């Protein structure tokens, strides 16, 4: 008998009742070596490896929606058993822990074998709807792919991964999910900015959840090593497991598959650009085959709108992964994947055509998103100019992207009058909060001009589509989040959690469940980055050290 009343949640199970169906382990070639030491793994997709035991696991937070998603009763998350399992100390019946082999292009260069260096898949839960969800521990100790590193993760990066995964999901951005965040009770040494100054930090483990964690790099490694039979096995497996709607694997399905990856990747990037998310390390090993955001490392959220901005100090020189470059980098990454699967297709043309699909899909999605962000019923040719000018104007003075768009909905553009009679001051009042320093009126003149242009466009939209001001606002507020995981907010939660107070992690998780809602009691989170956070580590500067 399950301990929870069946009437309440008939399909939710206890931990011991979860059913595992480990297709990847069953169907793909395994590394014959079972010892856990660092090595090149040839001819295999994964290695069996056990999580490392930790001293004193303590639950920091869990996401009840993710528990339900995999079919687990959320009450189970409060048990000691849950903490032990998701710290890596205990395996549930049916779990078959393993780490996957992949390679990748890092910062534009082929890096050879990388692999799950600190991620261990526990297995694929099959829920009552028949969906498969892979449970993956991040930071649960070394694997054959750990290279020179320790396989561990620290609390600060784990809080960031846990919160951002869930925040992105609730924003409507495709992403891996996070079930749990556990402190290990052990200390981990990190040199945060690679300055020869290592510090001890609390260790932590996040359990991530996704239909699969396969990356572009999983295919690249077999192509680079010319292990074409393994490449084909992995592609066929991926098609059957994650893309069953495309039909039986074969040359035609390979192309349809790549086209779909181009499309979903384009949609994901358009979402990032809509909400002001900068991934920070868009290496091909950090690109999911499912078009979901994966690997939350030195990511950041735009505060002042600036296409040149990157949160990643490791990328400060080249700024390859800056906000405005993300659409191009994704295309470059897709081209690497195309190269990797080419030997199975032997025809360049359809792969090139698929890359064009990426360009089109990205452009269409971006235009639709921009129309929604501005409250327009459609994006027309002339809107390119309107948006270009807006992007220029947003950079005249440091202007908070999130606050600007949200407040733009509130500017009274007096659409019902013949002439806009409002004074510049009146027009700008709702936008005041978006400026980091209130600039002189002449600096803002281009913005006032832009608002007039925008107003004309809205009038046109009203004439053509009957869009009222109320409809405009509703449309804008559904596209422009009010609350995002601002870098300094995450840091505040980290600082508290480091002192043993997990309430701010909870508060942010709750806040970010409804990022488009007004939430008047949470108004204080709708605030620009405070000055103290401008140059503070963790708030404006992050590195790959995590
Ligand atoms: P990233 O760019 O952070 O996604 O990581 C690139 C590669 O380094 C991946 O193969 C990771 O598994 C690996 N890696 C990162 N941090 C660690 C760590 N602390 N221990 C072992 N491997 C790591
Ligand atoms: Mg990675």
Image: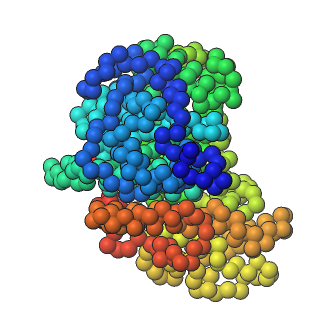
In front here: 298 or 444? 298
Task: Classify residue 361 as left or right of residue 42.
Answer: right
Task: Classify residue 382 as left or right of residue 213.
Answer: right
Instruction: Kindly tell me whether residue 362 is visible in this rendering.
Output: yes
Where residue 338 appears, x then y in whole percent? 53, 26
Task: Classify residue 499 as left or right of residue 407.
Answer: left
Residue in the picture at 65% in, 42% down:
361
Instruction: Kindly tell me whether residue 107 is visible in this rendering.
Output: no
Against 442, residue 362 (above or below) is: above
Where residue 101 appears, x then y in whole percent? 39, 26
Quarter of the image that includes the N terminus = top right
In front here: 340 or 6? 6
Residue placed furthest toward the left: 196
Against 413, residue 198 (above or below) is: above
In front here: 341 or 309? 341
> How many numbered circles does the render carry?
0
Q: Quadrant of residue 259?
A: top right
Q: Quadrant of residue 141?
A: top left
In this figure, which colouring scheme has been used for the structure?
rainbow
Residue placed furthest toward the front: 1
Residue in the picture at 56% in, 64% down:
515
Residue in the picture at 84% in, 64% down:
464
Where residue 538 appears, x then y in whole percent? 32, 60
Residue in the picture at 54% in, 19% down:
342
In front here: 137 or 283? 137
């Amino acid at each position: 008998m399950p301990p929870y009343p069946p009437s309440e949640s008939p399909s939710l199970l206890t931990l011991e009742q979860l059913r595992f169906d480990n297709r990847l382990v069953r169907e793909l070639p395994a590394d014959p070596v079972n010892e856990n030491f660092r090595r090149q793994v040839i001819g295999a997709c994964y290695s069996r490896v056990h999580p490392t035991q930790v001293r004193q696991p303590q639950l920091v937070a869990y996401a009840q929606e993710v528990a339900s998603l995999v079919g687990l009763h959320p009450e189970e998350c409060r048990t000691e058993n849950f903490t032990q399992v998701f710290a890596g100390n205990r395996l549930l019946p049916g779990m078959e822990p393993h780490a996957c082999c992949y390679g990748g292009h890092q910062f534009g260069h082929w890096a050879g074998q990388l692999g799950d260096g600190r991620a261990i898949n526990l297995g694929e839960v099959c829920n009552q709807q028949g969906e498969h969800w892979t449970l993956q521990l991040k930071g649960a100790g070394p694997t054959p792919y750990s290279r020179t590193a320790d396989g561990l993760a620290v609390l600060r990066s784990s809080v960031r991964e846990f919160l951002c995964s869930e925040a992105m999901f609730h924003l409507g951005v495709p992403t891996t999910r996070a079930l749990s965040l556990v402190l290990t009770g052990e200390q981990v040494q990190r040199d945060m900015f690679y300055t020869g100054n290592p510090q001890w930090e609390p260790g932590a483990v996040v359990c991530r959840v996704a239909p699969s964690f396969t990356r572009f790099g999983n295919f690249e490694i077999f192509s680079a090593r010319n292990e074409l039979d393994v490449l084909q096995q992995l592609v066929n497996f991926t098609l059957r497991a994650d893309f069953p709607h495309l039909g039986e694997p074969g040359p035609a399905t390979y192309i349809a598959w790549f086209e779909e990856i181009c499309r979903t990747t384009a949609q994901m990037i358009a979402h990032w650009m809509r909400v002001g998310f900068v991934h920070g390390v868009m290496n091909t090993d950090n690109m999911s085959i499912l078009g979901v955001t994966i690997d939350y490392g030195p990511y950041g959220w735009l505060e002042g709108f600036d296409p040149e901005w990157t949160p990643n100090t490791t990328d400060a020189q080249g700024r390859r992964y800056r906000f405005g470059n993300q659409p191009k980098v994704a295309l470059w990454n897709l081209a690497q994947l195309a190269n990797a699967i080419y030997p199975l297709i032997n025809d360049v043309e359809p792969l090139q055509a698929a890359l064009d699909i990426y360009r089109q899909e990205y452009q269409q999605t971006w235009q639709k998103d921009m129309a929604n962000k501005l409250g327009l019923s459609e994006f027309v040719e002339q809107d390119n100019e309107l948006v270009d000018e807006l992007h220029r104007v947003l950079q005249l003075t440091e202007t908070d992207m999130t606050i600007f768009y949200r407040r733009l909905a509130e500017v009274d553009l007096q659409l019902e009058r013949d002439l806009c009679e409002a004074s510049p001051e009146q027009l700008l009042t709702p936008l005041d909060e978006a400026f980091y320093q209130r600039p002189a009126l002449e600096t803002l003149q281009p913005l006032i001009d832009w608002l007039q242009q925008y107003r004309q466009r809205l009038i046109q939209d009203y004439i053509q589509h009957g869009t009222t001001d109320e409809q405009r606002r509703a449309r804008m507020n559904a596209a422009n989040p009010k609350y995002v995981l601002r870098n300094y907010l995450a840091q505040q939660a980290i600082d508290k959690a480091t002192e043993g107070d997990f309430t701010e992690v909870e508060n942010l998780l709750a806040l970010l469940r409804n990022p488009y809602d007004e939430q008047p009691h949470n108004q204080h989170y709708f605030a620009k980055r405070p000055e103290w956070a401008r140059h503070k580590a963790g708030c404006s500067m992050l590195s790959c050290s995590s």
